[in-house]
Image (cartoon, grey):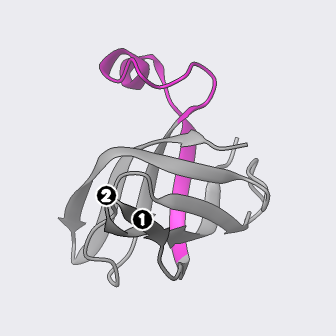
Amino acid sequence: MDYNAIVSIKQLQGDENDKKQGLPTSGLKAVIIPAGDQILALNPELPVGQGYSFVILSDTLSSILPESEIDVTTAMNSDLTTLDVFIVKGVPRKNKVLGQVHFSGTCIKKN
């Protein structure tokens, strides 16, 4: 199974009384895979069958906020489709490996 994709991310902006989605950041390389037993054990709030783990490569983003929307724009011959939309759960971890910034975390499938 292949889970590579090109995605766009829409992050929430504003305050707790007036939240709205900002402009999307497009063209980001991502790997989104179904969450394994270990991820589900550490995150019991993730619904079984709808939980996913992701890694997004990006030098343009400074952070990814909880409740951000990840839209698949190009499926790259993977098992994902352009209709797939994911919602970020929790705060993704930011890492830098060999000069490349990547974010990893968990999300749920919106559809």
The label shown at residue 16 is 2
Residue 68 in the image, given as x and y percentages of width and height = 45, 59
Residue 7 in the image, given as x and y percentages of width and height = 59, 69
State which quarter of the image contains the N terminus.
top right
Position of residue 56 in the picture relative to residue 74 (left or right): left
Q: Marks 1 and 2: CB-CB under 8 Å? A: yes
Residue type at mark 2 is Glu
Instruction: Give the residue at x 35% y 24%.
Output: 43
The label shown at residue 66 is none
Residue 102: image quadrant is bottom left
Q: Is residue 11 visible?
A: no
Residue 35 in the image, given as x and y percentages of width and height = 50, 30
Mark 1 residue element: strand
Mark 2 residue element: loop
Instruction: Give the residue at x 53% y 59%.
Output: 69
Distance (Cα) linking label 1 and label 2: 6 Å
**Mark 1 sits on what residue?**
19
Rate crowding at label 1 as few (under 14), some (14 to 19) or many (20 or more) other CA atoms within 10 Å: few
User: Of residues 89 and 17, which is closer to you in this image?
Assistant: 17
Residue 25 in the image, given as x and y percentages of width and height = 50, 80
User: Of residues 85 and 76, which is closer to you in this image?
Assistant: 85
| Residues shaded magenta | 28-51
State which quarter of the image contains the C terminus.
top right
Residue type at mark 1 is Lys
